[in-house]
Amino acid sequence: MGEVKSGRDEEFQAFIVAAWPRLVRTAYLLAGEQYAAEDLVQSAAEKACAAWSKVRRADDPYAYVRRILVNQHARRWRRRAPELLVDAVPDAAGAEDGFARCDQRGALLAALATLPPRQREAVVLRHWEDLSDSSTAAAMGCSVGAVRSHAAKGIARLRQVAALVEFKDTTTIGGAA
């Protein structure tokens, strides 16, 4: 029995170590703050660990844990006032971005912070995570139509943000150049 539990623990540990950077990036975009993102991922990881036997049998364990993450974020959002996004992006985005895109990212993150929670979730999952409408709907726990509506409204609001208009020539927002 001890060897089975040890193998399960090692399997979960390997999974969470591999998924951690992507989960933190998604959580950061949802929560808007590095420490809140890490807390959110830690909370999702705890829930996933408790239900690991169910999670590992899922078709896509990462999607399962991402859904836990989105649900955790939604619960936290309902309980307290919205967090503000900071201007700096964690290094998880990768070194290839360089300093040239920092202003663009900062403006985009600040604009993202102005979106209502469901619009922010839809935009992050559809356009940062590059999920399909159906995968986003599954992660958000809503219909595909609701995802399309939230994402379209969120993108429309982002297109109206003055700070993003100046970057319109070099940045695509929701597929528009």
Image (spheres, rainbow, N blue to C red):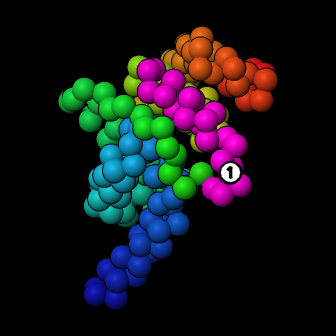
Task: List the residue tagged with mark 1.
Answer: 98
Q: Quadrant of the N terminus?
A: bottom left
Magenta segment, which residues? 94-115
Q: Is residue 55 magenta?
A: no
Q: Position of residue 61 (x, y in %)?
A: 49, 56
Q: Is residue 107 magenta?
A: yes
The residue at 26%/35% (across/down) is 76
- Residue 70 seen in the figure: no
Left-right relation of 102 to 1: right
The foreground one among 60 and 14 is 14
Q: Quadrant of the C terminus?
A: top right
Circle 1: residue type: Gly
The residue at 36%/76% (across/down) is 9
Q: Position of residue 96 (x, y in %)?
A: 71, 55
Q: Secondary structure at mark 1?
A: loop
The answer to whether 139 is drawn above or below residue 51 in the figure is above
